[in-house]
């Protein structure tokens, strides 16, 4: 799952190319097999579907269930890309709502999902992380 196949690689390199997270992500993703890439996609889809279901069900982003999904999302990044402590995950949450492309990714799935995901991540980062 090389970032070289990603149309946003140049932008990402300019923004984060001098960070440890970028270096680690590049190191990890270079060696992924097609099966691992598929697993990563399936895990992410399941996480996003869980967020959408919680939003549809009216669960508060601060709820234990929403925080658990936020923790799964954080652990997914941590496992497959780079160490992602809660504070870094909060920074990503900000990007999910401030960058129109990220916002569209979530909100095209479900209206209001970007704000919901960001709020759940902030809630998870600010409290005890529930078991995933």
Image: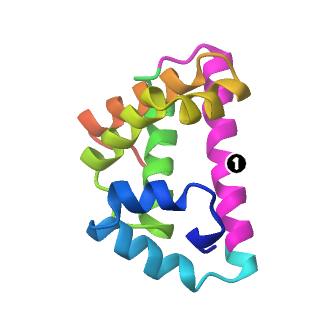
Residue drawn at x 37%, y 58% is: 14
In the image, is residue 115 above or below residue 32?
A: above
3 and 38: which is toward the camera: 3
In the image, is residue 127 above or below residue 129?
A: above
Q: Is residue 35 left or right of residue 59?
A: right
Q: Position of residue 58 (x, y in %)?
A: 60, 13
| Residue 30 visible at all | yes
In the image, is residue 108 above or below residue 130?
A: above
Residue drawn at x 65%, y 37% is: 50
Q: Is residue 49 magenta?
A: yes
Residue 25, located in which quarter of the rendered image?
bottom left
Residue drawn at x 50%, y 48% is: 73
Label 1 SS: helix
**Which region is colored magenta?**
37-60
Q: Main secondary structure of the magenta part?
A: helix
In the image, is residue 33 above or below residue 11?
A: below
Residue drawn at x 63%, y 28% is: 104
92 and 50: which is toward the camera: 92
Q: Position of residue 80 (x, y in %)?
A: 51, 68
Q: Is residue 73 left or right of residue 91?
A: right
Residue 37, located in which quarter of the rendered image?
bottom right
> Residue beneath label 1, please?
45
55 and 104: which is toward the camera: 104
Q: Is residue 5 left or right of residue 10?
A: right
Q: Position of residue 17 (x, y in %)?
A: 34, 66
How packed is label 1: few (under 14 Cα within 10 Å), some, or many (20 or more)?
Answer: few
């Amino acid at each position: 799952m090389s970032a070289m196949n990603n149309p946003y690689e140049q932008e990402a390199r300019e923004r984060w190319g001098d960070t440890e997270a970028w270096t680690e992500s590049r190191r990890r993703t270079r060696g992924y097999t097609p099966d691992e890439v598929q697993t990563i996609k399936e895990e992410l889809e399941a996480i996003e579907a869980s967020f959408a279901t919680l939003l549809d069900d009216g669960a508060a982003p601060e709820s234990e269930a929403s925080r658990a999904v936020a923790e799964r999302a954080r652990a997914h990044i941590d496992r497959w890309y780079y160490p992602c402590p809660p504070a870094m995950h909060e920074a990503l949450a900000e990007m999910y709502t401030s960058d129109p492309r990220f916002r569209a990714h979530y909100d095209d799935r479900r209206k209001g999902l970007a704000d919901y995901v960001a709020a759940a991540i902030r809630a998870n980062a600010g409290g005890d992380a529930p078991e995933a």
